[in-house]
Image (spheres, rainbow, N blue to C red):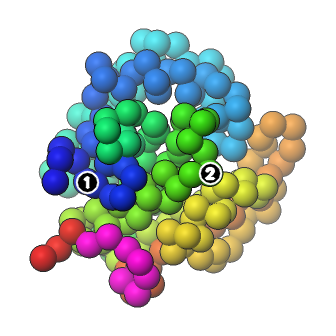
Amino acid sequence: MAHGWEGDLVRLVPLDAERHLENALRWVNDPEVTGWLLIGDTPMARGAEREWLEATAAESSRMGATNVVFAIETLDGAHIGTSGIHHIDYANGVAHTGSYIGEKGLWGRGYGTDSSLVRAAYCFDVLGLRLLCSAYLEGNERSRRMSEKAGYREVGRWPKRYWKRGAFRDEVLLALEREAWEAGPAYRFTT
């Protein structure tokens, strides 16, 4: 395996401010990219994004980290997005997940689904978790389809939870349990 956790289309690699800053800065300041994300409604300055990348990379590198964030790269090394595991609760085997593909020309081509499958394998095989939680804003059809393909199922909603682009939107709550993931077409990192 090359550097990182590899799927059919993508590789999840450690964040590196020098390597990933320019794309991340461009994406978080692009209203089309952030239209369905809970980021991007205020301008992000270069220094602030660099600080976030460096702090997140340092946190992700610590043993027992409660947040692990990867850059999503194609197999030929092009940086296309970000994927994270947040609020990791090792005692209960639960974490929250999320990701986005920032390269708009690659939307709807399976890169998000592949990165979610690789991330799930990392969560279950490497971290030993049992339940992954996620969410998307109602109306985000790309995220809904990607989540379903990755094995997540809807478990509830917070009605009109977030204001985004002119309307209050439901937060659709999702779960992926280890048993469901093991029964599906998932990647495996164990021997």
What residue is disc 1 on?
Answer: 5
- Judging depth in this view, the residue of 120 and 108 nearest the camera is 108
Which secondary structure type mostly characterizes the magenta part of the structure? loop
* Rendered location of residue 66, percent (x, y): 31, 52
Drawn side of residue 154 relative to residue 114, left or right:
right
Residue 184 or residue 96, whichever sits in front: 184
Magenta highlight on residue 103: no
SS at mark 2 in the image: loop
Compared with 47, 14 (above or below) is: below
Residue, x 57% and y 27% (percent of image)? 28
> Residue visible at 62% across and 51% down?
108
Res 187 → quadrant: bottom left
Rounded to the nearest angstrom, the CA distance separating label 2 from label 1 is 21 Å
SS type, badge 1: strand
Q: Which residue, as the protein is rendered here, is positioned at the far front?
A: 76
- The span shown in magenta is 181-188
* Residue 163, horizontal then vertical, whole percent: 78, 43
* Residue 161 location (% of width, % of height): 75, 54
Q: In the rendered view, would you say 184 is above or below 31?
A: below
**Which residue is denoted by mark 2 in the rendering?**
108
Residue type for callout 1: Trp
